[in-house]
C-alpha cells in the first residue's frame, strides 16, 4: 500500500532534480538506535525511456528519474530500504561510502549472503547510520550504473556540522551516453581507441614542428613520437569513452540547473561525482570555495579556487556569493571533452552563462609511465602466491631506446639527460629515470624489512630518483590558482589514531591498454584470489599504478587513510585516485568483518577486471568465542 | 519571506523524494529481519567472477580493383572473432574474383583458435583451406595446418606471421604487416604488405621455392564512423621467381597493378 503511494509520488517527482532544501542543522529530532522505529524508503528499479541528450533512449532508473531520488537520512537512525527490481535482469544497490554490515553492502556474490536482486523481486536493506555527510548510492551489477541507476545520499549529523550555511544543494555530476553501455564496453574491447578522436596525427605533428622554435625542439618532437610508437602506447589516452553528455543533477548544461542564493548567504554545495568514467575539474569563476568535507568526513576548512573530483568522490564546499550575480558552476571533464554546468543565481530560469573555451587537453608524458615494477616480492595479501597472467602487465618498454640520448639505464648522470627534450616533448627526466631504473632498484627485489615506520614511499622515489608527486593535480589552471590536493585534506576528527601498519600489502594496478584488460597484481577479478585481512590489523596498501591511466580505487566497508603526510590528520576517504605512474600508500584499519570489494571505480575498468574481493576474518581462535 | 523562498524552491526541487512511511507500517512490514544478515560469510563461490565474451568483425578490404582495361576485380579480406580476453575463435576470409569469368579467382578461409600469450601478441592455431575455383584452370584446393602469431610490433605495426603445412608437404610462411598512418583522426593512410615464402614446390598451386608471391597496397580511408570507412588506393601483386614462370605458363601475367575503391567495415 505504501509502495503505491510512494511510486506515484516518485513519478510526480520524476523530472525534478535531486536537491535538498535549506535546512537548519540539528533542528530535526534525532531518533536513537533502538528507540524509534526505522524509517522506511522504497526504491523501484525500472527500464525507462529518457530524453537526456536530445532523443529518447532506453535508460535504467530508480523511481523513474535520473539521478535517483535523494535519500536523506539522519545519523543515528536505522533505515529500511525496499528495493524492487522491475528490470529484466538481476540488479543491486550499493550504498557508496557507508560503513555498514557486509550483508547490507549490496555487491552480488560478494557481500555476505547477498546474491543480487532477482527480476520481479524486492530486497530489503536494513542498517543503522553511524556516520554523517554526503554519499551516494548506485547499482553494483554489470553496467547499470551507466544506464542511470545512481542517486545522492545525504546523512544529516546528530551534532551540527562545525560550519554554518544557509542553503544546501546537491550537485551530482554524471556522464550520460545515448549508447547502450554494453555496446560501449564491446567497442572498447575491440578497439581501446574507439572513442579517442584526439590521437596524435600527421597533421598535429606538422603543426607542432611548425611551432617548434629550433632544430633541437623539432628533433625532440620526432624523438617523442618515435618513443611512443616503439612503446605502442597512446599519450592521448586520457578518457576511455567519449560521446558523453555531462550532467548536473540529471540536466545537461543547456538545462542550466540553478542553485538559488540571496546575496550574503552561505551556500553548501555537495559535489558528488556519479559518473561512470569521468574525472572533473570543478571551478566557479569569481568565487572561492571552502572545502569543508571530503568523502563525507569533515576536514579543516581549506580555501581553493578549483578542485579535481575523481569518479565516485564527494566534496562539500561552501561558497559565499555577495553580489546578486549569476555564477557558473563548471565541471570540465579531465579529457576536456565537455562541461557539466550549473548556475548559482538569485532567480530561476536564467539562461546559462556561455561556457568558457576548454583548457588544453592533457597529454601523457614519460612521467606517466609506471611499470612494470613487479613481481617484487612483497606481501600481496592473498592466501596463495600470485603470478602475473600473460598479457596483463606491460612489457619493460621504453627502457631501451637506443636512439634516445639520455634514455639509457640510469648510468647517465642527470646533467646529461636530453638537452632539448624538455621544452616541447614535456618529458620529466627525473620520472624517466624512475621508469628506467625500475622499482626493483629500490630494494623490493629482496623483501625488505617492511618499512613500518610510516616512511613515505613516494617521497623516497624509485631508484633513488625523485618520483612524481601523486597528489598534485595539474588542472591546467593559471599560475597562482589554488587547486585542492589530497595533501590539503586534514581530518577534523579521525577515529583512528596514527599508528604504524602491521604489514604492507602491495597492490599493483595493472592492465593491457591494447586489449582493454584491467587487473590488480596481474590478475583479473575473474581469476584472482581474495586479499585476506585479519580483523583488527592495520594494513598499508601500497597502490602502484603501472598503467597510464588514473584509477580511482574504492574500498567498501572501511575507510582508506592515504598517507599524505598529515599524520593523525590524514583524511579518511572511500575513493583514492591513483594517478598514472605513481605509488601511493593507503592505510586501512580492518575493523569490519566480512567480505568486501576493492575496485577501480571507472565502471568499464571494474567490469574488465580491476576488482578484488577483500575478506576481513577474525582469527579462528576468537571466531568461535564470538 | 524565507518561507516563500522555500516554497518557490520546493516547486522546482524535490527534497526527499521518497518520504518515509509511518513507523507503524514499517513495523508491520518488518516482521522478518533481513535474511542477508543471518548468512555466514565465506559462503558460495562468487558468481560475479565472470568472463566477458565479445566479438568483432573487421572487413579490411571490400573493394573493386581496376587496371583500366576490361572488367574490374572484386576483392574481399576480412576477419571475425569471438571469445574472451584470452581465448578466441577467429575466422579469416580472403577472396578475389576472376577478371574474365566474373567468378572467384582465389578464396582462402582460415579457422583459428587464438590465445593471448603476451601483452601485444596472440598465438594462433588452426586450419586454412584454399578453395578450388574452377574445375579446369585456376589453382587446386589445398588444406593446411596453421600456426601463427598476430599482434602489434614496436612502432604500431599490425603484424601477422603464419606458417602453413599442407598435405602436399610443402611448408609455407606468410608475413603480413600494415600500418595506420593517421593524417587526421579520421583520414587514415594504410600501407600494407604481404610476403609468401615456400620451402618447396607445388606447381599446381603456383608455388615455387623461396619468395613466390607478394602483395602490397596503399589505401586512404575516411572514417565516417569507426564502423564505416570508404577508401581509395592502389594495390600491387606479383608472382616472384619460379612462381612467375608458373604463372606465365598458365597464360597469366605475373604482375598486376590496380586502382582500388572500397569500404572498410568494423563492427
Image (cartoon, coloured by chain):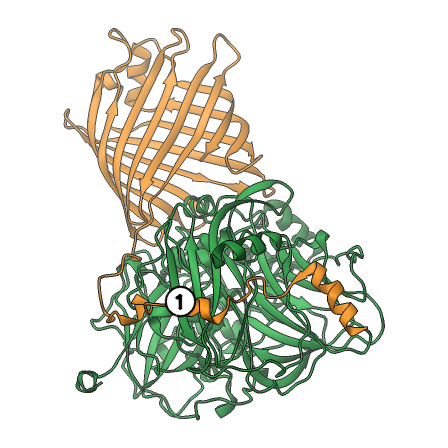
Res. A259 in view: no
Q: Name the subunit of mark 1.
A: B
Residue A338 placement: quadrant: bottom right
Callout 1 crowding tier (Cα within 10 Å): few <14, some 14–19, many ≥20:
few
Vertical arrangement, residue A532 with respect to residue A524, above or below? below
Residue A248 placement: quadrant: bottom right
Q: Which residue is mark 1?
A: B28
Q: Tell me: B1 left or right of A445.
A: right
Vertical arrangement, residue A391 with respect to residue B60, above or below? below
Residue B121 locus on image (x, y percent): 32, 49
Q: Which chain is green?
A: A
Q: Colour of chain B?
A: orange
User: Residue at the location (51% across, 9% down)?
Assistant: B69
Residue A98 placement: quadrant: bottom left
Nearest the eye: A364 or A266: A266
Give the tally of numbered discs.
1
Q: Tell me: A623 left or right of B92.
A: left
Vertical arrangement, residue A121 with respect to residue B204, above or below? below
Residue B97 locus on image (x, y percent): 39, 15
Residue A209 locus on image (x, y percent): 66, 53
Res. A231 in view: yes
User: Residue at the location (52% across, 67% down)?
Assistant: B20
Quadrant in the picture for the C terminus of chain A: bottom left
Nearest the eye: B144 or A588: A588
Residue A474 locus on image (x, y percent): 61, 70
Q: For numbered disc 1, what is the local secondary structure?
A: helix
Nearest the eye: B228 or A486: A486
User: Residue at the location (47% across, 84% down)?
Assistant: A32
Amino acid at each position: 500500500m505504501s509502495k503505491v503511494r510512494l511510486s506515484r509520488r516518485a513519478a510526480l517527482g520524476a523530472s525534478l532534480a535531486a536537491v535538498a532544501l535549506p535546512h537548519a542543522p540539528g533542528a530535526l529530532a534525532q531518533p536513537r538506535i533502538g528507540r524509534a522505529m526505522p524509517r522506511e524508503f522504497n526504491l523501484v528499479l525500472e527500464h525507462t525511456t529518457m530524453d537526456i541528450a536530445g532523443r529518447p533512449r532506453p535508460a535504467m532508473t530508480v523511481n523513474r528519474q535520473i539521478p535517483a531520488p535523494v535519500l536523506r537520512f539522519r545519523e543515528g537512525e536505522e533505515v529500511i530500504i525496499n528495493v524492487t527490481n522491475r528490470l529484466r535482469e538481476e540488479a543491486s544497490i550499493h550504498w557508496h561510502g557507508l560503513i555498514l554490515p557486509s550483508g547490507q553492502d549490496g555487491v552480488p556474490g560478494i557481500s555476505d549472503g547477498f546474491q543480487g536482486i532477482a527480476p520481479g523481486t524486492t530486497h530489503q536493506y536494513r542498517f543503522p547510520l553511524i556516520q554523517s555527510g554526503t554519499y551516494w548510492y548506485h547499482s553494483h551489477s554489470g553496467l547499470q550504473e551507466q544506464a542511470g541507476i545512481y542517486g545522492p545520499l545525504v546523512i544529516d549529523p546528530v551534532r551540527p556540522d562545525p560550519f554554518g550555511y544557509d542553503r544546501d544543494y546537491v550537485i551530482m555530476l554524471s556522464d550520460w551516453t545515448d549508447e547502450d553501455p554494453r555496446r560501449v564496453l564491446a567497442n572498447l574491447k575491440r578497439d581501446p581507441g574507439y572513442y579517442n578522436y584526439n590521437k596524435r596525427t600527421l597533421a598535429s605533428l606538422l603543426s607542432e614542428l611548425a611551432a617548434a622554435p629550433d632544430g633541437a625542439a623539432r628533433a625532440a618532437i620526432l624523438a617523442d613520437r618515435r618513443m611512443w610508437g616503439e612503446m605502442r602506447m597512446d599519450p592521448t589516452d586520457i578518457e576511455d569513452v567519449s560521446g558523453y553528455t555531462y550532467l548536473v543533477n540529471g540536466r545537461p548544461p543547456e538545462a542550466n540547473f540553478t542553485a538559488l542564493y540571496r546575496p550574503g548567504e552561505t551556500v553548501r554545495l555537495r559535489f558528488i561525482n556519479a559518473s561512470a568514467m569521468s574525472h572533473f575539474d570543478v571551478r566557479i569563476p569569481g568565487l572561492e570555495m571552502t572545502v569543508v568535507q571530503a568523502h563525507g568526513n569533515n576536514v579543516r576548512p581549506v580555501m581553493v579556487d578549483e578542485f579535481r573530483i575523481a569518479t565516485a568522490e564527494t566534496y562539500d564546499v561552501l561558497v559565499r556569493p555577495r553580489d546578486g550575480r549569476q555564477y557558473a558552476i563548471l565541471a570540465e571533464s579531465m579529457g576536456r571533452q565537455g562541461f557539466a554546468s550549473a548556475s548559482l543565481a538569485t532567480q530561476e530560469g536564467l539562461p546559462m552563462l556561455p561556457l568558457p573555451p576548454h583548457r588544453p587537453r592533457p597529454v601523457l608524458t614519460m612521467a606517466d609511465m609506471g611499470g612494470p615494477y613487479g613481481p617484487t616480492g612483497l606481501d600481496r595479501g592473498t592466501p596463495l602466491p600470485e603470478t602475473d597472467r600473460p598479457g596483463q602487465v606491460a612489457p619493460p618498454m621504453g627502457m631501451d631506446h637506443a636512439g634516445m640520448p639520455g634514455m639509457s639505464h640510469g648510468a647517465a648522470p642527470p646533467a646529461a639527460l636530453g638537452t632539448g627534450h624538455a621544452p616541447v616533448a614535456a618529458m620529466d627526466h627525473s620520472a624517466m629515470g624512475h621508469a628506467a631504473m625500475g622499482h626493483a632498484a629500490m630494494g623490493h627485489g629482496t623483501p625488505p624489512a617492511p618499512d613500518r615506520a610510516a616512511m613515505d614511499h613516494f617521497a623516497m622515489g624509485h631508484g633513488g630518483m625523485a618520483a612524481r608527486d601523486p597528489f598534485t593535480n595539474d588542472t591546467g589552471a593559471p599560475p597562482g590558482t589554488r587547486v585542492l590536493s589530497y595533501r590539503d585534506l586534514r581530518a577534523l576528527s579521525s577515529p583512528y589514531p596514527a599508528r604504524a601498519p602491521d604489514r604492507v600489502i602491495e597492490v599493483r594496478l595493472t592492465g593491457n591498454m591494447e586489449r582493454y584488460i584491467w587487473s590488480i597484481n596481474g590478475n583479473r577479478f575473474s581469476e584472482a584470489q581474495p586479499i585476506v585481512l585479519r580483523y583488527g590489523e592495520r594494513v598499508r596498501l601500497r597502490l602502484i599504478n603501472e598503467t597510464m591511466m588514473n584509477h580511482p580505487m574504492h574500498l567498501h566497508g572501511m575507510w582508506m587513510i592515504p598517507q599524505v603526510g598529515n599524520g593523525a590528520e590524514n583524511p579518511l576517504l572511500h575513493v583514492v585516485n591513483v594517478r598514472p605512474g605513481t605509488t601511493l600508500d593507503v592505510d586501512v584499519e580492518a575493523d569490519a568483518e566480512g567480505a568486501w570489494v576493492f575496485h577501480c571505480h571507472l565502471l568499464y575498468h571494474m567490469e574488465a577486471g580491476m576488482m578484488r574481493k577483500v575478506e576481513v576474518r577474525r582469527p579462528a581462535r576468537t571466531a568461535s568465542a564470538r | 519571506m524565507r518561507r516563500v523562498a522555500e516554497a518557490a524552491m520546493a516547486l522546482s526541487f524535490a527534497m526527499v523524494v521518497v518520504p518515509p512511511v509511518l513507523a507503524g507500517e514499517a513495523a508491520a512490514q518488518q516482521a522478518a529481519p533481513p535474511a542477508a544478515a543471518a548468512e555466514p560469510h565465506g559462503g558460495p563461490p562468487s558468481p560475479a567472477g565472470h568472463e566477458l565474451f565479445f566479438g568483432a568483425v573487421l572487413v579490411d578490404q571490400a573493394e573493386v580493383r581496376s587496371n583500366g582495361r576490361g572488367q574490374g576485380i572484386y576483392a574481399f579480406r576480412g576477419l571475425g572473432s569471438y571469445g574472451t580476453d584470452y581465448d578466441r575463435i577467429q575466422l579469416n576470409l580472403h577472396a578475389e574474383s576472376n577478371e574474365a569469368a566474373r567468378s572467384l579467382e582465389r578464396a582462402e578461409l582460415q579457422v583459428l583458435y587464438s590465445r593471448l600469450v603476451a601483452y601485444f601478441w596472440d598465438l594462433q592455431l588452426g586450419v586454412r583451406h584454399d578453395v578450388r575455383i574452377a574445375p579446369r584452370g585456376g589453382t587446386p584446393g589445398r588444406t593446411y595446418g596453421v600456426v601463427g602469431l598476430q599482434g602489434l610490433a614496436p612502432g604500431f605495426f599490425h603484424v601477422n606471421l603464419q606458417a602453413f603445412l599442407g598435405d602436399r608437404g610443402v611448408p609455407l610462411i606468410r608475413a603480413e604487416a600494415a600500418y595506420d598512418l593517421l593524417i587526421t583522426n579520421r583520414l587514415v593512410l594504410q600501407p600494407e604488405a604481404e610476403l609468401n615464402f615456400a620451402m618447396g614446390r607445388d606447381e599446381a598451386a603456383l608455388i615455387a621455392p623461396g619468395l613466390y608471391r607478394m602483395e602490397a597496397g596503399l589505401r586512404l580511408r575516411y572514417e565516417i564512423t569507426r564502423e564505416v570507412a570508404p577508401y581509395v588506393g592502389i594495390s600491387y601483386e606479383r608472382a616472384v621467381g619460379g612462381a612467375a614462370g608458373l604463372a606465365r605458363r598458365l597464360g597469366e601475367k605475373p604482375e598486376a597493378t590496380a586502382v582500388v575503391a572500397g569500404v572498410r567495415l568494423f563492427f
